[in-house]
Image: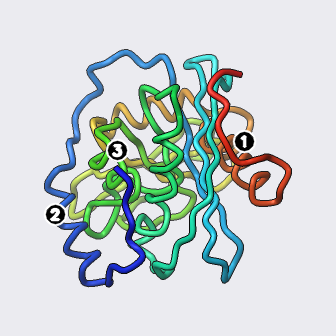
Amino acid sequence: MTQDYNQITIPEATALQQELRSKVLIQAPDFPINTVAGADISFNKNSTTVYAGIVVLKFPELQPVAYCLVKKEVTFPYVPGYLAFREVPALLEAWKLLKVKPDVLVVDGHGIAHPRGLGIAAHFGVLTGQPAIGCAKKLLFGKYDEPGEQRGDFSPLLNKGVMIGAVLRTKPNVKPVFVSPGYKMDVPGSLSLITQCIGNYRLPEPTRLAHNAVNHFREGTLPEGCVNTL
């Protein structure tokens, strides 16, 4: 499962994205969801060290039950639309060590709302077979109208009239997040799950906790390794 993209070129990465895109499964979730996880990475600017983390939560209680933190050296360049080639290898290392696998993984990034239909959540899902959703802080691809200002308001994220995701308001008068299915999920299922994962912050709880964990890890206040029962 371990991938190493350090030597791959951008044209090669583009070809690989197009190949993997053909393997993406977009479907309504047909399984019970008792756990959900958030995945995120962190790095210091101009550093080749990537800090990756996955935090598993009970659902719908949203209580953490496990986490895994790893770091990996990455030399693939920081290029918009190709961030998975920097982030996926480290996340796969964390995934491999994580004994408590979630029913759905929420990745800080995009699913199919991507110029070639293969954001990090879709990329990761194809490689692992794991149901996954992308939940990003910024728009990468698609067009939308601003959603309403209340928590839970959303608007369609469109590509040539096709709904590829949703733009979701998680807090009143705060910038929305961008939700799109990655693998073995669809837009309604992804939107429903993320809406149920909203806490008191802009980011849904799975990716918020993963974001906090990897930043503490990078800053040295959390150690590398896995805790498989909290």
Q: Which residue is mark 3?
A: 181
Q: Which badge, 1 or 3, is on the more N-terminal residue? A: 3
Q: Which residue is mark 1?
A: 201
Asked if residue 84 is positioned above or below residue 11 in the image, the reply reads above
Image location of residue 34, percent across then percent down: 48, 16
Q: Please, what is the three-letter code of the amino acid marked with disc 1?
A: Tyr
Left or right of 166? Residue 207 is: right
Nearer to us: label 2 or label 3: 2
Nearer to us: label 1 or label 3: 3
The foreground one among 149 and 183 is 183
Image location of residue 68, percent across then percent down: 62, 40
- Please say whether residue 9 is visible from this viewpoint: yes
Query: How far apart are labels 1 and 3 at the CA level?
Result: 21 Å
The quadrant of the rendering that contains the C terminus is: top right
Q: Which badge, 2 or 3, is on the more N-terminal residue? A: 2
The foreground one among 93 and 21 is 93
Mark on residue 19?
Answer: 2
